Image (cartoon, grey):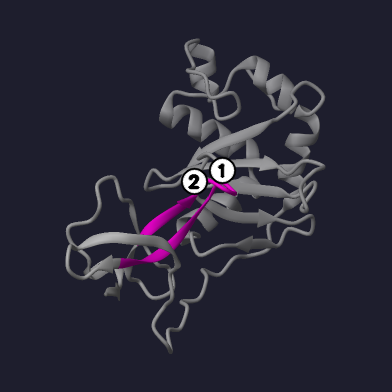
Amino acid sequence: MATTYRAVKMYPLPAGAATSTCPKCQKEVLIQHSYHNNRSYLTDVVLDSMQNKVTARNLFHKCPPGTVQPPLPFTPKLNAAAILNLFTTAAVHLKYPKIRLQTASGQPVVVYRAGARSMYNGQVQVTDGGHFGCGKYFGRIDLEGNFHGTREVTPELVSLLTQLSEDPAGVAARYGKLTGNCCFCGLKLSDKRSTDVGYGPICADHYGLAWG
Protein backbone atom coordinates (compact mmCIF):
# COMPACT_ATOMS: atom_id res chain seq x y z
CA MET A 1 0.00 0.00 0.00
CA ALA A 2 1.41 3.39 -1.02
CA THR A 3 2.02 5.95 1.69
CA THR A 4 2.34 9.71 1.15
CA TYR A 5 5.36 11.48 2.67
CA ARG A 6 6.79 14.95 2.52
CA ALA A 7 9.91 15.08 0.39
CA VAL A 8 11.84 16.52 3.33
CA LYS A 9 11.35 13.25 5.23
CA MET A 10 12.37 11.07 2.32
CA TYR A 11 15.76 9.39 2.10
CA PRO A 12 17.59 8.39 0.09
CA LEU A 13 16.39 10.83 -2.56
CA PRO A 14 16.00 9.35 -6.05
CA ALA A 15 19.07 9.67 -8.26
CA GLY A 16 19.20 13.03 -9.97
CA ALA A 17 16.40 14.52 -7.87
CA ALA A 18 16.60 18.26 -7.30
CA THR A 19 15.26 19.93 -4.17
CA SER A 20 14.22 23.45 -3.28
CA THR A 21 12.94 25.28 -0.22
CA CYS A 22 9.27 26.19 -0.35
CA PRO A 23 9.16 30.00 0.05
CA LYS A 24 5.92 29.75 2.03
CA CYS A 25 6.43 26.95 4.57
CA GLN A 26 10.26 26.77 4.35
CA LYS A 27 10.21 22.98 3.87
CA GLU A 28 12.65 21.24 1.57
CA VAL A 29 10.70 19.54 -1.20
CA LEU A 30 11.37 17.98 -4.58
CA ILE A 31 11.25 19.89 -7.85
CA GLN A 32 9.07 18.18 -10.44
CA HIS A 33 9.74 19.18 -14.06
CA SER A 34 6.86 18.93 -16.50
CA TYR A 35 7.96 18.34 -20.08
CA HIS A 36 4.39 18.96 -21.19
CA ASN A 37 4.59 22.72 -20.59
CA ASN A 38 8.33 23.03 -19.81
CA ARG A 39 7.75 24.31 -16.27
CA SER A 40 8.96 23.21 -12.87
CA TYR A 41 6.84 22.77 -9.75
CA LEU A 42 7.41 22.05 -6.09
CA THR A 43 5.95 18.65 -5.35
CA ASP A 44 5.34 16.09 -2.64
CA VAL A 45 6.01 12.46 -3.48
CA VAL A 46 4.29 9.12 -3.15
CA LEU A 47 6.55 6.32 -1.92
CA ASP A 48 6.06 2.59 -1.86
CA SER A 49 6.26 1.96 1.90
CA MET A 50 7.69 -1.53 1.40
CA GLN A 51 10.42 -0.83 -1.19
CA ASN A 52 11.02 2.88 -0.50
CA LYS A 53 10.68 3.67 -4.21
CA VAL A 54 8.96 6.61 -5.82
CA THR A 55 5.73 5.40 -7.45
CA ALA A 56 4.42 8.85 -8.45
CA ARG A 57 5.86 12.35 -8.57
CA ASN A 58 3.00 14.30 -10.07
CA LEU A 59 1.47 15.77 -6.92
CA PHE A 60 1.69 19.49 -6.26
CA HIS A 61 3.33 20.45 -2.99
CA LYS A 62 0.84 21.43 -0.27
CA CYS A 63 1.96 23.55 2.66
CA PRO A 64 0.77 22.58 6.17
CA PRO A 65 -2.57 24.16 7.18
CA GLY A 66 -2.21 27.60 8.75
CA THR A 67 1.07 28.42 7.01
CA VAL A 68 1.48 32.18 6.62
CA GLN A 69 3.47 33.41 3.63
CA PRO A 70 6.29 35.84 4.61
CA PRO A 71 5.89 39.41 3.31
CA LEU A 72 7.84 40.63 0.29
CA PRO A 73 10.68 43.13 0.79
CA PHE A 74 9.52 46.74 0.58
CA THR A 75 9.93 48.05 -2.95
CA PRO A 76 10.04 51.80 -3.61
CA LYS A 77 8.62 53.19 -6.84
CA LEU A 78 11.25 52.97 -9.56
CA ASN A 79 12.08 55.25 -12.45
CA ALA A 80 10.94 52.88 -15.18
CA ALA A 81 11.48 55.50 -17.89
CA ALA A 82 15.25 55.55 -17.31
CA ILE A 83 15.48 51.78 -17.85
CA LEU A 84 13.00 51.68 -20.75
CA ASN A 85 14.87 54.46 -22.55
CA LEU A 86 17.93 52.19 -22.73
CA PHE A 87 15.91 49.45 -24.42
CA THR A 88 14.12 51.87 -26.74
CA THR A 89 17.45 53.25 -27.94
CA ALA A 90 19.04 49.80 -28.26
CA ALA A 91 16.04 48.37 -30.17
CA VAL A 92 17.12 50.37 -33.20
CA HIS A 93 20.24 48.18 -33.43
CA LEU A 94 19.37 45.01 -31.49
CA LYS A 95 16.45 42.60 -31.70
CA TYR A 96 16.62 41.40 -28.09
CA PRO A 97 18.54 43.91 -25.93
CA LYS A 98 19.16 42.94 -22.32
CA ILE A 99 21.19 44.07 -19.33
CA ARG A 100 23.20 41.60 -17.23
CA LEU A 101 23.92 42.51 -13.63
CA GLN A 102 24.56 40.85 -10.28
CA THR A 103 23.68 41.60 -6.67
CA ALA A 104 26.20 42.24 -3.91
CA SER A 105 26.20 38.53 -3.04
CA GLY A 106 26.80 37.48 -6.65
CA GLN A 107 23.24 36.57 -7.68
CA PRO A 108 22.96 36.95 -11.49
CA VAL A 109 20.24 39.33 -12.63
CA VAL A 110 19.08 39.84 -16.22
CA VAL A 111 16.79 42.71 -17.18
CA TYR A 112 14.97 42.97 -20.51
CA ARG A 113 11.82 44.43 -22.04
CA ALA A 114 8.90 42.08 -22.70
CA GLY A 115 7.94 41.73 -26.36
CA ALA A 116 4.63 42.05 -28.18
CA ARG A 117 3.68 38.40 -27.56
CA SER A 118 3.88 38.87 -23.78
CA MET A 119 0.87 39.80 -21.67
CA TYR A 120 3.19 42.42 -20.14
CA ASN A 121 4.25 43.92 -23.45
CA GLY A 122 6.69 46.79 -22.98
CA GLN A 123 7.27 46.18 -19.28
CA VAL A 124 10.68 45.38 -17.77
CA GLN A 125 11.18 41.72 -16.87
CA VAL A 126 13.69 40.68 -14.18
CA THR A 127 15.11 37.12 -14.06
CA ASP A 128 18.37 35.34 -13.24
CA GLY A 129 18.99 34.63 -16.93
CA GLY A 130 18.19 30.91 -16.66
CA HIS A 131 16.26 29.01 -19.31
CA PHE A 132 12.47 29.18 -19.18
CA GLY A 133 11.11 26.80 -16.56
CA CYS A 134 14.50 26.35 -14.88
CA GLY A 135 15.67 29.82 -13.90
CA LYS A 136 14.39 32.27 -11.29
CA TYR A 137 11.77 34.87 -12.14
CA PHE A 138 12.07 37.88 -9.85
CA GLY A 139 9.19 39.94 -11.23
CA ARG A 140 8.45 42.88 -13.52
CA ILE A 141 8.53 46.66 -13.49
CA ASP A 142 5.40 48.17 -15.03
CA LEU A 143 5.32 51.39 -17.03
CA GLU A 144 4.50 53.42 -13.91
CA GLY A 145 7.58 52.14 -12.08
CA ASN A 146 5.82 49.68 -9.77
CA PHE A 147 7.84 46.52 -9.15
CA HIS A 148 5.68 43.39 -8.99
CA GLY A 149 8.06 40.99 -7.29
CA THR A 150 7.88 37.26 -6.62
CA ARG A 151 8.95 35.34 -3.52
CA GLU A 152 12.47 35.14 -4.98
CA VAL A 153 13.02 38.86 -4.36
CA THR A 154 15.62 39.89 -1.79
CA PRO A 155 16.40 43.34 -0.33
CA GLU A 156 19.71 43.47 -2.20
CA LEU A 157 17.89 42.82 -5.50
CA VAL A 158 15.53 45.70 -4.72
CA SER A 159 18.56 47.88 -3.99
CA LEU A 160 20.16 46.93 -7.32
CA LEU A 161 17.00 47.74 -9.30
CA THR A 162 16.64 51.04 -7.48
CA GLN A 163 20.22 51.98 -8.39
CA LEU A 164 19.63 50.93 -12.00
CA SER A 165 16.56 53.13 -12.27
CA GLU A 166 18.39 56.11 -10.78
CA ASP A 167 21.74 55.75 -12.57
CA PRO A 168 21.71 53.20 -15.42
CA ALA A 169 25.10 54.21 -16.80
CA GLY A 170 26.73 54.07 -13.37
CA VAL A 171 25.36 50.61 -12.60
CA ALA A 172 26.44 49.34 -16.02
CA ALA A 173 29.93 50.75 -15.50
CA ARG A 174 30.28 49.20 -12.03
CA TYR A 175 29.29 45.76 -13.33
CA GLY A 176 31.90 45.94 -16.10
CA LYS A 177 34.66 47.05 -13.75
CA LEU A 178 33.72 44.37 -11.21
CA THR A 179 33.39 41.38 -13.57
CA GLY A 180 35.48 42.42 -16.57
CA ASN A 181 32.50 41.78 -18.86
CA CYS A 182 30.14 44.19 -20.60
CA CYS A 183 26.67 44.09 -19.02
CA PHE A 184 25.02 44.70 -22.39
CA CYS A 185 26.61 42.15 -24.73
CA GLY A 186 28.20 39.87 -22.12
CA LEU A 187 31.58 39.90 -23.84
CA LYS A 188 34.89 40.33 -22.03
CA LEU A 189 36.27 43.86 -21.94
CA SER A 190 39.72 43.59 -23.51
CA ASP A 191 40.46 47.21 -24.39
CA LYS A 192 41.87 49.33 -21.55
CA ARG A 193 39.56 52.22 -22.30
CA SER A 194 36.58 49.87 -22.16
CA THR A 195 37.67 48.41 -18.82
CA ASP A 196 38.13 51.93 -17.48
CA VAL A 197 34.61 52.94 -18.59
CA GLY A 198 32.94 49.61 -17.75
CA TYR A 199 31.45 48.87 -21.20
CA GLY A 200 32.57 49.04 -24.82
CA PRO A 201 32.10 51.80 -27.42
CA ILE A 202 29.73 49.77 -29.61
CA CYS A 203 27.36 49.01 -26.75
CA ALA A 204 27.64 52.62 -25.56
CA ASP A 205 26.46 53.75 -29.00
CA HIS A 206 23.66 51.14 -29.09
CA TYR A 207 22.30 52.15 -25.69
CA GLY A 208 22.92 55.91 -26.04
CA LEU A 209 25.56 56.18 -23.30
CA ALA A 210 28.70 58.30 -23.11
CA TRP A 211 32.03 56.56 -23.64
CA GLY A 212 35.68 57.55 -23.60
Q: Secondary structure at mark 1?
A: loop
Q: Position of residue 146 (x, y in %)?
A: 71, 62
From the image, tell me which residue sits under label 2: 135
Q: Look at the image and say whether residue 54 sits in the magenta stretch.
A: no
Magenta-span inclusion, residue 36? yes
Q: Position of residue 191 (x, y in %)?
A: 50, 10
Which residue is farthest bottom? 66
Q: Is residue 4 left or right of residue 159?
A: left
Q: Amino acid at mark 2?
A: Gly
78 to the left or right of 23: right
Question: From the image, which quarter does the N terminus lie in?
Answer: bottom left
Q: Is residue 107 above or below residue 93?
A: below
Q: Which mark is residue 132?
A: 1
Residue range in magenta is 30-46
Q: Residue at x 52, y 46 (%)?
A: 35
Q: What residue appears at the point 73 percent right and 35 percent down from the top-left corner?
A: 86
Type of the residue with mark 1? Phe
> Which quadrant of the structure image shows residue 206?
top right
Horizontally, residue 151 falls left or right of residue 123, namely left
Q: Secondary structure at mark 2?
A: loop
Q: Residue at 19% across / 63% down in the picture?
A: 52
* Relative image position of residue 62 (x, y in whole percent): 43, 75
